């Protein structure tokens, strides 16, 4: 028998949904500064490392990135407002969006720099980067149809723990080092952020905390002699206006030699949609359940559009939704960030901004995000799964540690291959093991976290399936291997395979699964976890509510129980008023 649904409600139709609220100001300065730092960094990498001419960077690459950013941020703001209206609540926060930080360094140092060093042609290196970004976008578009199934069955501890690993290592550690390099600037800024975003204390006149922190840090930096007026004067000369055009010939030229690009594009594309999946889970834990497929389609489209316009830097949904939600951000901050950063890309103002704002006044917001995401992984996962959260952290920590060793050796004019594993191990550096552990860190963290969580729950069949997935992924090089191939790391694959066999043996003893406690059931009811569905008794069917004459009624089929969390709401038809 069909259920009856009101196709119009006065509450939702008349619910005020402002374009901007005070909290959007805080979130705008936070996310805007985050994206600003990343665009400043990629600008420097293009000019200083790959030697791409400044004219191409400021007139093509940055404007192309600006177009991708404004499209993505506007779309995410639209998704947030749509979710707010369908759920009848005004406190929905849009997903943050910007150039992907890991991809930013990988496309420069793994894709473009080797081509430049081999050919001494920065434009040829740029073509390879554009082709690589395009492939990344296509893989993410495919992942949009796979990711929802992974999210449905993966333990929350694995998803959030993996995200925490990214946040603690790659998002927080470098900013923390930059802060302590000039702590006299950074710590007052960090204190203001903590007070304004993690307590109920308000500044006089309700001054936005993000703006106040940036201005205080900038004032301290200039007063202390950390900044130079001559650098500002020189940066003014770089200001110019440019809009991007299609660079399909450049893209197709780069795609003509696609085979070398696939070795990194496939695992990094998988990384992209896996990170997007964990970010959506993080937003759901904070109260906003988005349709994962919609998010990933936007990510993939942004990379494809940006590549077609000439940008080798694929944008992605950012870590940090809970932080901007806690800051009071809703949907306006996303639109404003996309519009303002895009305008800066078109005008070429990033050199000027880098000369005005001290780095130590900007990066504390990244450490704040790292603290929040790391804490969320434990707060919104079952207490029994705390060890699984830590397990999911470890591959990203290993990947970060290896990157630090590699960078230090490169600065000394050598490499890990030249020093040798034995030489490194004699100094206490377990380089090879950390390198293997950290390769494909996002997927590896998801596998390891899920495996530990299922073992804790005594769900040995599920743990065995995860171990078999680890064996397959490592065999083809998507995790624990430097490249995609066949039998890339047979020893690691064998380890996973033996673990799967042992899980099968334990499963034959038919152990009773762990019983979730009341707190875990409440958490799963709130965020759509599996425990509540497995343990809770089904609710009795309620009688249909009486419907006022002024509201039309239509029959609607029951929601699909297999739908991704949040998908049913977003698939529902828009309410329409009767006569």
Image: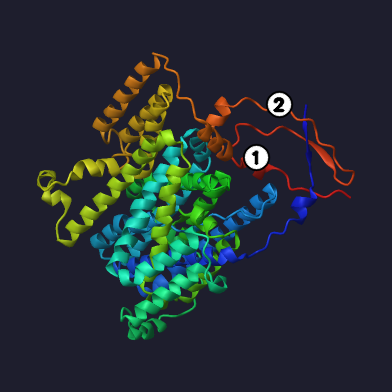
Residue closest to the eye, 253 or 417: 417
Q: Position of residue 296 (x, y in %)?
A: 52, 48
Residue 39 shows in this picture = no
Identity of the residue drawn at 15% across and 49% down = 417
Within-10-Å neighbours for mark 1: few <14, some 14–19, many 20+: some
Numbered disc 1: secondary structure: helix
Identity of the residue drawn at 39% across and 57% down = 101
Q: Which-is-in-front pick, marks 2 and 1?
A: 2
Which label number is shown at residue 109? Answer: none
In which image quadrant can residue 42 be found?
Answer: bottom left
Q: Relative to 233, say whether 12 is above or below.
A: above
Q: Relative to 31, say whether 349 is above or below.
A: below
Identity of the residue drawn at 24% across and 62% down = 117
Within-10-Å neighbours for mark 2: few <14, some 14–19, many 20+: few
Residue identifier under label 2 = 540
Residue closest to the eye, 435 or 135: 435
Residue 468 shows in this picture = yes
Numbered disc 2: secondary structure: loop
Q: Position of residue 481 (x, y in %)?
A: 28, 40
Identity of the residue drawn at 61% across and 42% down = 566
Residue identifier under label 1 = 568
Q: Position of residue 532 (x, y in %)?
A: 56, 30
Residue closest to the eye, 300 or 11: 11
Q: Relative to 464, say whether 143 is above or below.
A: below
Q: Position of residue 340 (x, y in %)?
A: 53, 70
Q: Please state, as top left, top right, bottom left or bottom right, where the N terminus lies in the image.
A: top right
Q: Is residue 95 left or right of residue 135?
A: right
Q: Earlier in the sequence, mark 2 or mark 1?
A: 2
- In this figure, what is the number of numbered marks? 2
């Amino acid at each position: 028998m069909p259920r009856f649904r009101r196709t119009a409600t006065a509450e939702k139709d008349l619910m005020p949904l402002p374009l901007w609220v005070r909290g959007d100001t805080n979130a705008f300065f936070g996310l805007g500064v985050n994206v600003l730092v990343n665009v400043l960094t990629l600008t420097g990498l293009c000019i200083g490392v790959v030697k791409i001419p400044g004219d191409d960077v400021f007139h093509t690459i940055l404007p192309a990135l600006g177009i991708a950013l404004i499209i993505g941020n506007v779309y995410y703001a639209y998704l947030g407002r749509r979710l707010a209206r369908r759920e009848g609540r005004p406190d929905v926060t849009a997903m943050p969006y910007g150039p992907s930080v890991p991809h930013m360094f990988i496309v420069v140092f793994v894709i473009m720099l080797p081509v430049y060093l081999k050919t001494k042609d920065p434009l040829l290196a740029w073509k390879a980067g554009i082709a690589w970004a395009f492939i990344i976008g296509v893989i993410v578009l495919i992942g949009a149809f796979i990711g929802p199934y992974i999210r449905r069955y993966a333990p929350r501890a694995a998803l959030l723990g993996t995200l925490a690993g990214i946040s603690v290592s790659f998002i927080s550690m470098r900013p923390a080092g930059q802060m302590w390099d000039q702590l006299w600037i950074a710590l007052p800024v960090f204190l203001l952020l903590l007070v304004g975003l993690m307590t109920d204390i308000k500044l006089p006149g309700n001054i936005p905390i993000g703006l106040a922190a940036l201005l205080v840090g900038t004032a301290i930096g200039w007063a202390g002699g950390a900044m130079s007026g001559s650098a500002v004067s020189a940066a003014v000369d770089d200001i110019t206006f440019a809009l991007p055009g299609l660079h399909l010939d450049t893209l197709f030229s780069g795609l003509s030699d696609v085979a070398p690009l696939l070795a990194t594009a496939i695992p990094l594309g998988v990384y992209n949609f896996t990170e997007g999946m964990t970010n959506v889970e993080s937003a759901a834990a904070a109260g906003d359940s988005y349709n994962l497929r919609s998010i990933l389609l936007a990510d993939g489209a942004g990379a494809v559009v940006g590549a077609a316009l000439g940008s080798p830097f694929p944008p992605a949904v950012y870590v940090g939704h809970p932080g901007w939600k806690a800051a009071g951000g809703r949907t306006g901050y996303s639109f404003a960030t996309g519009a303002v950063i895009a305008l800066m890309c078109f005008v070429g103002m990033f050199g000027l901004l880098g000369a005005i704002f001290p780095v130590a006044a900007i990066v504390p917001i990244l450490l704040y995000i790292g603290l929040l995401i790391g804490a969320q992984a434990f707060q919104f996962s079952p207490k029994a799964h705390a060890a699984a959260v830590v397990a999911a952290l470890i591959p990203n920590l290993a990947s970060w540690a290896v990157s630090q060793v590699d960078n230090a050796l490169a600065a000394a004019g050598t490499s890990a291959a030249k020093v040798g594993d034995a030489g490194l191990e004699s100094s206490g550096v377990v380089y090879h093991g950390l390198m293997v552990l950290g390769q494909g860190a996002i997927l590896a963290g998801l596998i390891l976290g899920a495996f530990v969580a299922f073992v804790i729950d005594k769900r040995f069949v599920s743990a065995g399936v995860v171990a078999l997935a680890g064996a397959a992924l490592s065999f083809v090089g998507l995790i624990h291997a430097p490249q995609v191939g066949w039998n890339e790391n047979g020893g690691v694959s064998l380890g996973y395979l033996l673990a799967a066999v042992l899980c099968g043996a334990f499963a034959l003893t038919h152990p009773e699964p762990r019983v979730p406690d009341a707190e875990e059931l409440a958490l799963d009811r709130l965020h759509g976890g599996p425990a509540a569905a497995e343990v809770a008794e089904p609710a009795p069917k309620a009688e249909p509510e009486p419907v006022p004459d002024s509201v039309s009624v239509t029959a609607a089929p029951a929601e699909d129980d297999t739908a991704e969390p949040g998908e049913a709401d977003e698939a529902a038809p828009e309410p329409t008023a009767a006569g």
